[in-house]
Amino acid sequence: MAKKKVAFICVHNSCRSQIAEALGKHIAADVFDSYSAGTKIKPQINQDAVRLMKQLYGIDMQQQYSKLISEIPVPDIAISMGCDVGCPYIGRDFDDNWEIPDPTGMPDEIFKRVISQIEKRIMDLKIKLIT
């Protein structure tokens, strides 16, 4: 059976969705393929996310970049990260809304809490897809 394609979506695809893509590839690649995208892009992804993911998990996100929804494969599962400004329309309904707050500009302890929430949701999704 082919692995499901999971897309993590936020408006700018610069922080939470990028973290989810990286963690999905790191801890759930055996169950699903991870992608992230948005309806707008930023010139670079959040550097606090890059720094903390390297520090916490040894994951190098330097090669990741902000992508539009049209640049990724059509997902089997689309997850909204919980856009504080209103979730983008992606051409279909979201399968889930994780409602995770944007840690951009927040202290490291808040950022780490958000990363931990995303990790837990990735693990929950992995378990759900294998059972």
Image: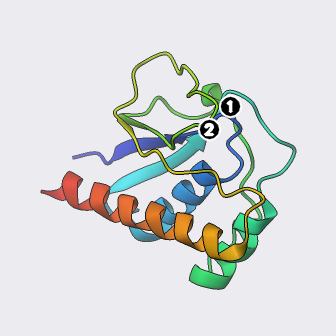
Residue 101 in the image: above or below residue 113: above
Q: Which mark is residue 85?
A: none
Q: Residue at x 72, y 48 (%)?
A: 14
The one of 127 and 10 positioned closer to us in this rendering: 10
On the image, the x and y values in percent for residue 88 come to: 58, 24
Residue receiving disc 2 = 37
- Amino acid marked by disc 1: Leu
On the image, the x and y values in percent for residue 85 come to: 64, 31
* Farthest residue, direction left: 131
Q: Residue at x 69, y 72 (%)?
A: 60
Circles 2 and 1 in contact, beta carbons < 8 Å: yes
Question: Which quadrant holds the C terminus?
Answer: bottom left
Residue receiving disc 1 = 68
Badge 2 density bin: few <14, some 14–19, many ≥20, Cα 10 Å? many
Check disc 2 and report its element: helix, strand or loop: strand
Q: Earlier in the sequence, mark 2 or mark 1?
A: 2
- Amino acid marked by disc 2: Ala
The one of 48 and 29 positioned closer to us in this rendering: 48
Residue 65 in the image: above or below residue 121: above
